Image: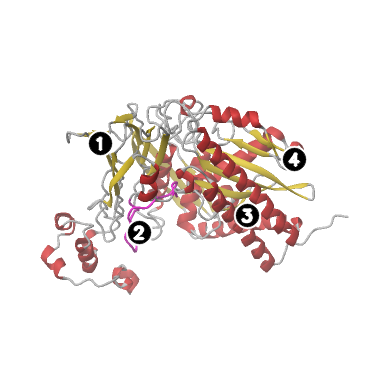
Amino acid sequence: MTVHKQPPDAITLEVIHNGLRSIADETFIALKKSAYSTNIKERDDHSTCLMDRRGRIVVQAERAQAIHLSSMSGHVRAVLAAFGVESLREGDIFISNDPYVAGGSHLPDVNFAMPVFVNGRLTAFSCNIAHHADIGGMTPGSMSADMTEIYQEGLRIPVVRLFREGRLVSDVLDLVLLNVRMPEERKGDYLAQVAACRLGERRFRELAARYSSDNIEMTFDEIIERTGRRMRRLIRMLPPGQYSFEDVMDSDGHGARDIKVKVAVTIQGDSISFDFAGTSRQVKGNINVPFADTCSMVGLALKGLLDPTTPNNQGVIDLVDVRAEPGTLVRPNFPAAVAFRTHTCQRIVDVILGALAPAMPEAVIAAGNGANTTAIFSGTDPRDGHRYLFLETLAGGCGARSFKDGKDGVQLYAANSANMAIEVFENSFPIRIERYEFVPDSGGAGQYRGGLALRRIYRTVAGDCLFVGSADRFTNVPWGLFGGGPGAAGRYVITDTNGTETTLDAKPAPVLVKEGEVIVVQSPGAGGYGDPNERNRKQLARDLQSGKYSGEFIERHYRRSIDELRAIQIDGMLDFEETLPHWRST
């Protein structure tokens, strides 16, 4: 006779769910605080999650990166396919990074997964992924626009055991460290990932001891199914039909320009599909997107539009039907280069927003900065002889909303990394940050303006360094919606010691920067929303008086008297009701 186990009651289920989420959050913080590199310990370029025994994501840390969701899942599926459940043992830890054979994202993102056993039975996986400042390859930082195939981008790691039954497989670690720059820093980061895996395992066992592994496994199913039901219910509320939009990438750094990204979104009942037919073929440069990341971006866009509070788990991934022809920009064939796939990931979200604007005008936002404006510095500090390597991505403008201005200087969509503090930067590297500021006039005009871009100005103060940059939206600027204006373009500029400026392409080859020279890194702004003539006078007065917008910009785009706006007294925050559209006030 088959005995059907009863799932836990609603209250117990919610307590278990929150317990699982707290494990993911705790392991995220543990990895951050244990890491050596600034990219992880300061910029939070990592993610953690718990998966069930089948490799389905159950909970992800609240501060995790959306782009990492499908990659972590792909890693565990690759573990199960390569080794099978039967060969997994307590204390094993598996690593990989390859997008073509291990479900990965790009090579600097190294996945770790540890099977969790309760009473001798495989029950879950404790997982994490972190972006390492270097994984080898032809250029320091393992990310450069002159890369044209994945072999140039660094060490490709298939699914391998790093720990076998709790013991380090030292020859695997030795092989990895031999192929990367600054191996001591890399080793520290890898061991931080190991510690996070083990913490997740320990906390999961503690939770299972309290609520039983049977109850927890039934909770897994309910968490994922509940997310799916919630999303499908919201999809049914959308107007059925097909909605299309296209945009272009500036370039791939190797001659291809205005590279098309196109999507057709079809809504029917409680189903929704995303078809990227018409998107350009894969390119020589490294802005191609592994299909796992394309799926992550579709899930992110849909979740953000329907219900941002929906838990991020397998229910979101399973819901979306994503179609893309192999050999295209969003589903490249081996050995396409993918290091800077994040630029295209940003554009994937933008085209989905553009497509669904007619169906969801109140939910969508105008185009954001649409890039992952990158600055990588490497060299040897002549003051102590130590080699250094620093990577950061500069935030930019967020697209304006249907009821509010876009946010200034924030990471968007695929990127969720933190700001790098100037004090930490200057204490760690022989480079000084001379300015860090919003870029005036960089957010598009509208009833609600786009978010402002950021600008950092760096000066080398001790020795030469190699600068590697890669960005987008330097020529094709972020568009506005429903009459809103476009945001400003980004730029890279190097000024030598004689004051001569050299403007770089969005995806330049690595550049040697001499001691005393200056590098300007400016991200793109974002598009505005709605007719600029409908903008509230007090908001315009604040734009002018804050210095975020010049009188010339306001006169040109809003046709308002500058003297009149200067005379308006602005005290504290604007009344929220004063910023709402007319239809919301009636």
Q: Earlier in the sequence, mark 1 or mark 4?
A: 4
- Residue under pointer 2: 401
Residue at label 3?
224
Residue 516 on the magenta segment = no
Q: Residue at x 71, y 67 (%)?
A: 9
Task: Give the Cα distance between marks 1 and 3.
Answer: 55 Å
Query: Residues at badges 3 and 2 in contact (C-beta under 8 Å)?
Result: no
Disc nearer the start of the sequence (1/2): 2
Foreground of the two, 578 or 84: 84
State the image quarter where residue 79 is shown. top right
Amino acid type, callout 4: Arg
The quadrant holding residue 489 is top left
**Is residue 52 left or right of 445 when viewed as pictured?**
right
Colouring rule applied to residues = secondary structure
Question: Counting residues from the N terminus, which is met first, the one under dot 3 or under dot 2?
Answer: 3
Earlier sequence position, callout 2 versus callout 4 = 4
Q: What residue is disc 1 on?
A: 516
Q: Residue furthest bottom?
A: 586
Q: Amino acid at mark 3?
A: Ile
Name the secondary structure under disc 2. loop
CB contact under 8 Å: marks 3 and 4: no
Residue at numbered disc 4: 89
Query: Which residues lie in the magenta part?
Result: 397-417
